[in-house]
Amino acid sequence: MRIITLPSKDAEDELQHQQSLSWIDSSGDAVLALGRNYPAGFRVPLHSHAKTQLWCAREGIVLVGTARGRWMLPPGHGLLIPAGLEHATEMVSAVRMQSLYVNADVVAAADPRVLEVTPLAASLMEELVHSEETPLSDKRKWLIMELLLDEIGRLPERPLGLPFPADQRLARLCRHFLKTPAANAGIDDWARDLGMSRRSFTRFFRAETGLSFVTWRQQACLFASLPRLAEGQSVTSVALDAGYENIAAFTTMFRRMLGSSPSNYLRARAG
């Protein structure tokens, strides 16, 4: 298979973005590689691709949203986006992005999944994205592509997706929570706000999000905290603002979900 690579560019306006979408979907190549730089605050409106996309944040933090959820990509992570799924993106900070677009019969995805990009996968993507500047032989391109596709199937999944309910009343509470996270937020308060019993709310919340309230609350606290940590804010202030009684409790949650302490995790991703 052939790979077509675009060199990294600064953020383009809407017209150029639409031209890129047309190029991606009309290409007959099974795999495409693309690199770009985006400024903080840049938004890509709702769109979809005919190919499965692996959207990787090499630097910076990105939010990808669909009708039913949001996914956060800190440095060193990628989002596997199913072909045909409408999604929009927002750059929380300045972002260096690299993406693969692969025919759905080569890499299939039923739902979006946040994956931790291994050093091997990152190096292989870097080679492909910059092959315009440093040409590769057809044989080397093919070998890199085959190894990268195999490595994608081995990337560990991370809990950086946050399902959002379809019910607008519950969605309002979820959005408010992301703005003002509280690790000790109680089910009873949310149930009272919606005029439900605790038992009814518990069933309703799981039916709307697919998660228990406690699990969603924990993931939402992590979701809300990562951008602030990546900006360089102290673990202490982020932990206390998120409603944790002390740094140790926040660090324990962080390590349980992402495998290391906040400082070590972000240092490794930045490297």
Image (cartoon, grey):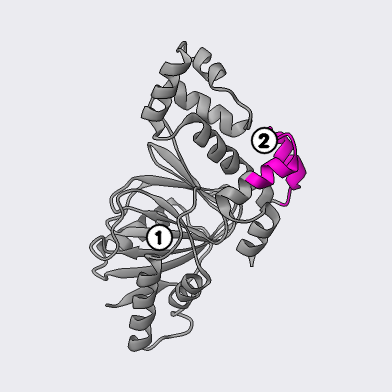
Q: Which residue lies under the disc numbered 1?
A: 54
User: Magenta span has 125?
Assistant: no
Query: 103 or 213, which is in the foreground?
Result: 213
Question: What residue appears at the point 40 percent right and 53 percent down from the top-left corner?
Answer: 15
For residue 2, what is the image quadrant? bottom left
Query: 14 or 211, which is in the foreground?
Result: 211
268 sits left or right of 237 in the view: left
Q: Amino acid at mark 1?
A: Leu
26 sits left or right of 63 in the view: left
Question: What residue appears at the point 60 percent right and 26 percent down from the top-left corner?
Answer: 185
Q: Which residue lies under the disc numbered 2?
A: 242
Residue range (magenta): 232-252
91 sits left or right of 155 in the view: right
Which element type, helix, strand or loop, lies under badge 2?
A: loop
Residue 32, x across and y down, in percent? 35, 69
Q: Amino acid at mark 2?
A: Ala
Foreground label between 1 and 2: 2
Report the quarter where the N terminus lies. Answer: bottom left
- Which residue appears farthest toward the top when viewing the image? 195
Residue 210 can be seen in this image: yes
Number of numbered discs visible in the structure rendering: 2
